[in-house]
Amino acid sequence: MPKYNVQPTNRPVFFKEEEIIVSKTDLRGRITYANDVFLRVAGFEESEVLGEPHSLVRHPDMPRCIFKLLWETIEAKREIFAYVKNMAKNGDHYWVFAHVTPSLDAQSNVIGYHSNRRAPDKAALSVIEPLYADLRSEEQRHNNARDGLNAGTAMLTEVITKSGMAYEEFIFTLSGVRDHASRPAA
C-alpha cells in the first residue's frame, strides 16, 4: 500500500535539460540517496524518501512490463535506458529518460542500483506515450495481475521484434541518439 494516497492531477512538472535527477537504491529498491533535483521535482523532503521504495514516485500510467524489463536487466548486471513517467508527491507527473545501472562491489557483486534521469526527448514521447497506454491497457484487460504482466511483456516484445532492433537501439532511435559516443554519460 502506498505511503501517500495521491491521485494523478494530469499536471506536468518540468525540469531543465541540463539538470539530472539522481537516486540510488539498495538491492530491494529502497532509496538510499536522492539529489536536490529529484527532491524538488518530486516534491519530497529527503527524510520522506530515504529508506522508502523507489516506487514511491511510480505513476499509475506506467506499464508494469517496463519495470519487469528494467529489473530483469539490472539484476543481470546490465544497464538499461527507459522512458518513465513518475508522479510527484502532489499527484503531478514528470517524464524522464532514465539510465539505470547496477552498483557493483570489488568482487562484481550487485550491492545496489544507481539511476540518472534526464529530461526526455519530446519527439520520443509522442511514440512512448501511446505505446505505454497500449501496454497498460493490455495489462489491465486480464483478470489477474500475472496474466496481465505476461500479456504486456509479450506485447512489448512483439513491438521491439517488429522494429527489427534490439530494445536499446529502439529506445535510442526514438530519442535521436544513434551511436554510443553520443549517449548520455552515466
Image: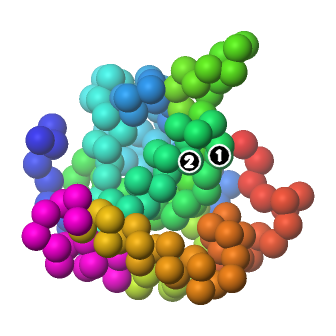
Can the viewer see residue 5 in this picture? yes
- Badge 1 element: loop
Report the span colored magenta.
Answer: 134-147
The percent position of residue 29, horizontal first and vertical second, equals 39, 33
Image quarter where the C terminus lies is top right
Tell me the residue that label 1 is attached to: 79
- Determine the main secondary structure of the stretch shown in magenta: helix
In the rendered structure, the answer to whether residue 137 lies left or right of residue 123 reads: left
Check contact, mark 1 vs mark 2: CB within 8 A: yes
**Residue, x 68% and y 69% (percent of image)?**
166
What residue occupies the far top of the structure in this picture? Answer: 106
**Residue, x 31% and y 44% (percent of image)?**
55
Q: Is residue 135 magenta?
A: yes
Q: Does the magenta stretch include residue 108?
A: no
The percent position of residue 5, horizontal first and vertical second, equals 11, 48
Tell me the residue that label 2 is attached to: 73
